[in-house]
C-alpha cells in the first residue's frame, strides 16, 4: 500500500483503506477493569467488529471464551504479564463479532482490551 500524495498516511487511514472504510476505536476495558475468578463479560456481541486484541497485564493467568462463560478448563489461555489474543475476521471468520467472556485463574487482575476494528 502506497502513501497518499501530499503526505504520509496515518495507521488509521491505512486500516480504513485496507478494510474498505472500517473505523478503528481504541478503548481500554470497555466492559470493566477488574477480572476475577467468576466469568465476566469482556466484549459484547457486535456484528460490525472485524478484529480485536486483548492483552493480559495481570500477574494471573486468564482465559477468554466466545459465546459462553469462560472457565479455566474451557477457554483460550492468556499467560500472565503479557499473554495476548488477536482475533481477525479474515482468519477467524465470525469469531470477532461474538460475545467474549474472561476469567482469572486466581485472584483479581486487569485485562487490557486494546483495539476494536
Image (tube, rainbow, N blue to C red):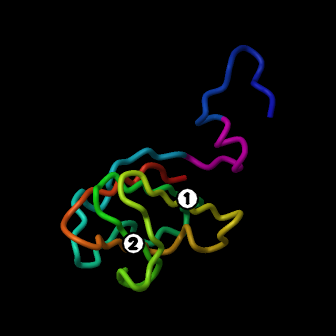
Q: In x, y percent, where is residue 31?
A: 29, 62
Q: Quadrant of residue 33?
A: bottom left
Q: In x, y percent, where is residue 106?
A: 23, 71
Q: Quadrant of residue 11?
A: top right
**50 relative to 28 in the view: left or right:** right
Magenta stretch: includes residue 15: yes
Relative depth, front residue between 51 and 4: 51
SS class, disc 2: strand
**92 relative to 40 in the view: left or right:** right
Q: Residue at x 25, y 60 (%)?
A: 32
Which part of the image, by quadrant, shows the N terminus? top right
Relative depth, front residue between 59 and 35: 59
Magenta stretch: includes residue 11: no
Relative depth, front residue between 69 and 72: 72
Q: In x, y percent, where is residue 107?
A: 19, 68
User: What's the magenta region?
Assistant: 14-23
- Residue situated furthest left in the rendering: 107
Q: Residue at x 37, y 56 (%)?
A: 56
Instruction: Tell me, for residue 86, which label it has, or none.
Output: 1
SS class, disc 1: strand
Where 55 falls versus 18 (above or below)?
below
Q: Residue at x 33, y 51 (%)?
A: 57
**Residue highlighted by disc 2:** 63
Q: Residues within 10 Å of mark 1 (few under 14, many from 20)?
A: few
Q: Residues within 10 Å of mark 2 (few under 14, many from 20)?
A: many
Q: Residue at x 67, y 72 (%)?
A: 93
Q: In x, y percent, where is residue 59?
A: 28, 56
Amino acid at each position: 500500500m502506497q502513501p497518499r500524495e501530499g503526505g504520509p498516511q496515518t495507521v488509521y487511514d491505512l486500516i480504513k483503506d485496507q478494510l474498505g472504510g472500517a473505523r478503528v476505536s481504541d478503548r481500554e476495558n470497555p466492559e470493566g477493569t477488574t477480572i476475577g475468578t467468576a466469568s465476566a463479560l469482556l466484549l459484547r456481541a457486535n456484528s460490525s467488529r472485524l478484529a480485536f486484541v486483548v492483552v493480559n497485564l495481570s500477574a494471573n493467568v486468564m482465559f477468554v471464551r466466545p459465546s459462553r462463560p469462560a472457565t479455566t478448563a474451557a477457554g483460550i489461555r492468556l499467560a500472565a504479564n503479557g499473554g495476548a489474543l488477536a482475533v481477525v475476521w479474515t482468519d477467524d471468520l465470525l469469531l470477532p463479532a461474538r460475545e467474549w467472556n474472561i476469567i482469572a485463574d486466581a485472584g483479581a487482575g486487569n485485562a487490557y482490551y486494546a483495539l476494536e476494528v
